[in-house]
Amino acid sequence: MIVDPDRSYDLIGDVHGCARTLARLLDQLGYRQQGGIWRHKRRQVIFLGDIIDRGPRIREALHLVHDMVEAGQAHCIMGNHEFNALGWYAEAPRESGQTFVREHTPRYAMLLQETFRQFEHYPEEWQAFREWFMDLPLFLQSERFRVVHACWDNSVIDQLRQRLQQGRIDAEFLREAAFPKQFAAKALDRLLRGTDMPLPEGLTLTSAEGFTRNFFRTKFWEENPKTYGDIVFQPDGLPEKAARLPLSESQKSRLFLYGPDEPLLFVGHYWRSGQPAPIRHNLACLDYSAVKYGKLVAYRLDQETLLDPAKFFWVNVER
């Protein structure tokens, strides 16, 4: 989906139900409520997905974002959490061997449980929001900048343009995602969850939420990595012994690279911490763990072609 290249935008990272914090950030950015909708005379917001799950005011956050989008005051792309919600309810094709596109495992139940709880008495609203999720594009772009939840891969996006209208998934594409080896599942994993690599044999990681995995999330901009530690990009890092292990030439050849000469790219997803700043002159992650009492972060984009550290704005999330 193409956005207006001449407009100024405020790009905002993963909200995860932090509605009051979002209102504070919008106020700081000069937006004002008019007719119940946050508006700015000259700017629009682009939300980077993951509006739902985990936070204390998911329903309120969805209403705020949805109403801004419907009023032409914002765009919003799909995050992996919105897709998880769609997949939880979507029946999988029988030949997939699954009951639902997102099987009702303890992991997905845990991720979605707070959203389910807050909509328990508003089932019709929740259904209407899920229908709206189908309207959320997987990516946005102009000549100067690109927006995706986790990773921009030109080869995947070129194929998606041929399959999808305006980068929005349809019911057929959603059902195809039940097959892990087919294009839909691989494309959604790349754009909504990023790139990864298997851990060294015998090593696993256990997240703060108690789930164990045998892979780790990787950088997609490192031009000359030498070790596992050079490419890890996740909050929990790697054990020191694993981080020092050298990458083989075969592993290096399979790494994906978003090049330094590509347009500006904005992503969320990665639970960063510390002072918001560019990762590289053309790459910014705007997810700074708001729902974990971090920061809700925006980047004020005008006509620049190189990211400006002074244009990151944020509010700290208070307990």
Image (spheres, rainbow, N blue to C red):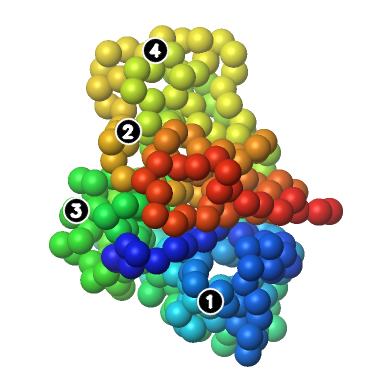
Choose mark 1 or mark 4, whichever is in front.
Answer: 1
The residue under the point 31% across, 45% down is 263
- Between the residue at mark 3 and the residue at mark 1, the CA separation in whole angstroms equals 34 Å
Amino acid bearing label 1: Lys
- Between the residue at mark 4 and the residue at mark 3, the CA separation in whole angstroms equals 30 Å
Q: Is residue 7 above or below residue 232?
A: below
The residue under the point 67% across, 43% down is 209
Contact, CB < 8 Å: mark 2 with mark 1?
no
Residue 174: image x %, image y %?
A: 33, 66
Amino acid bearing label 2: Pro
Residue 276: image x %, image y %?
A: 61, 41
Q: First in sequence: mark 3 or mark 1?
A: 1
- Between the residue at mark 1 and the residue at mark 4, the CA separation in whole angstroms equals 48 Å
In the drawing, what numbered circle is on residue 260?
A: 2
Contact, CB < 8 Å: mark 4 with mark 3?
no
Choose mark 2 or mark 1, whichever is in front.
Answer: 1
Q: Is residue 149 rendered to the left or right of residue 96?
A: right
In the drawing, what numbered circle is on residue 158?
A: 3
- Looking at the image, can residue 187 be seen? yes
Helix, strand or loop at disc 2? loop
Amino acid bearing label 3: Asp
Q: First in sequence: mark 2 or mark 1?
A: 1
The residue beneath circle 4 is 226
Q: First in sequence: mark 2 or mark 3?
A: 3
Q: Between residues 48 and 37, which one lies in front from this camera angle?
A: 37
